[in-house]
DNA sequence: GTTGAAAAATACTAACT
DNA sequence: AGTTAGTATTTTTCAAC
């Protein structure tokens, strides 16, 4: 962690894109795709982890196969918009495993929650026993997701084109 | 792929929960936590992958560090609700890397898109050059996410409690 | 200070019990 | 499902630019 790289070169971007695409790729394959040998590739990965560019690694599970048939986006409005109350709601939501995402929206100072449940009944139970009675909750609008057409993890990081990669490879080799 | 396990026992659930939490966990550590030895643990993982419970593995990247400062939830209404038109929109959206998720919502037959961009300008550019001119798009409501308070990947699968795990371990050992 | 190469440790895979 | 042996990968150490 001694060297905090200020800027990512195209090799780093290629590594990050490949790791987001396949989190269990072997280091040698990752190095081969990036055009460098394995040891410096592993050092770059460790550095990227230490620097916080990589937050972790996760298996992507199939929700439907595991019995989670319902995804709901709930828009929650609060009565108080004081910072302490907003943080309090976020802290409470963080303790509920059904809530997978919690985003604070601009303009109307309310939250968008992505909630995953086994079926509609269990979601209703969560709604009435957890979310509705929570402090500061003024209104809830639930939108059921019929089907998920696309579900990409992470960010739209693009692997560098061959030209850029070749240039940085030459720069790192000289 | 010969044995399609019809039901998951608590050991499988423990394995899935651990893999979702840490996708690069070693097989020996995974086996240790599940209470079985490494080879059968790896066989279970392969079976879970073949059966489709595990869709893949991904590195979780930090969007802000990588320059993606904007997350927008766009609610898109279409003019035509014919199945072919819905599928056509989904297919088009699938080609845009900025769109990370696309969910079809119930009731109003429109879509909720999760869009990640570098800044507000690049989002506007995407909006005017890609989404707005797309066929069948009638209206778009954009909601900017100020901050993301919670972002859990996947599903709320719970690791089995020790009692249930001990029972299944005894059953598998006999 | 970073990269490339080689050796030691570890984990994974495939057999058999 | 557990054990053992073979293979491959990761990790560490060292030399070179």
Image (spheres, coloured by chain):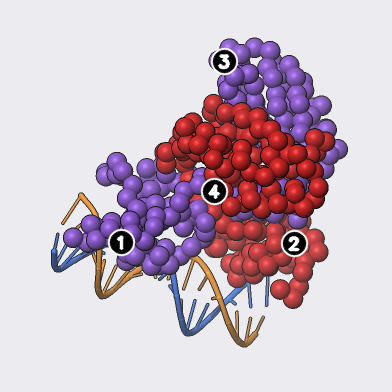
Chain colours: A purple, B red, C orange, D blue
Quarter of the rendering containing residue A122: top right
- SS state under label 4: loop
How much space separates mark 2 and mark 4, taking CA atoms?
Answer: 48 Å
Subunit of label 1: A
- Viewer can see residue B20: no
Pick whichever, B84 or B14, lies toward us.
B84
Is there a contact, CB below 8 Å, between mark 1 and mark 3?
no
Task: Categorize mark 2 by other alpha carbons within 10 Å: few (<14), some (14-19), many (20+).
Answer: few
Cα–Cα gap, marks 3 and 2: 49 Å
| Nearer the observer, B170 or C16 | C16
Disc 1/disc 2 C-alpha distance (Å): 57 Å
The residue to which callout 2 is attached is B170
Which mark is drawn over residue B97?
4
Position in image of residue D2 (x %, y %) = 63, 71
Q: Which residue is labeled 1 in the image?
A: A166
Question: Is label 3 in contact with label 4 (beta carbons under 8 Å)?
Answer: no
Q: Element at badge 3?
A: helix
Marks 1/2 in contact by CB < 8 Å: the verdict is: no
Identify the residue at image location x=74%, y=65%.
B172
Quarter of the image containing the C terminus of chain A?
bottom left
* Disc 1 packing (10 Å; few <14; some 14–19; many ≥20): some
């Amino acid at each position: 962690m001694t060297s905090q790289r200020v800027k990512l070169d195209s090799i780093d971007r290629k590594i990050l894109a490949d790791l987001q695409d396949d989190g269990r790729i072997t280091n040698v394959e990752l190095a081969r795709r990036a055009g460098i040998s394995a040891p410096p590739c592993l050092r770059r990965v460790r550095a990227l982890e230490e620097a916080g560019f990589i937050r972790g690694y996760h298996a992507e599970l199939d929700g439907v196969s595991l019995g989670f048939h319902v995804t709901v986006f709930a828009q929650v409005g609060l009565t108080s918009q004081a910072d302490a109350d907003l943080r309090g709601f976020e802290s409470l939501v963080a303790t509920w495993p059904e809530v997978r995402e919690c985003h604070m929206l601009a303009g109307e100072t309310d939250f968008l929650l992505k909630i995953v449940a086994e079926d509609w009944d269990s979601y209703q139970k969560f709604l009435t026993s957890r979310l509705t009675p929570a402090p500061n909750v003024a209104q809830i609008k639930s939108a059921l997701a019929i089907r998920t057409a696309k579900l990409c993890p992470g960010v739209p990081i693009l692997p560098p084109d061959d030209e850029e990669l070749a240039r940085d490879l030459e720069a790192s080799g000289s």
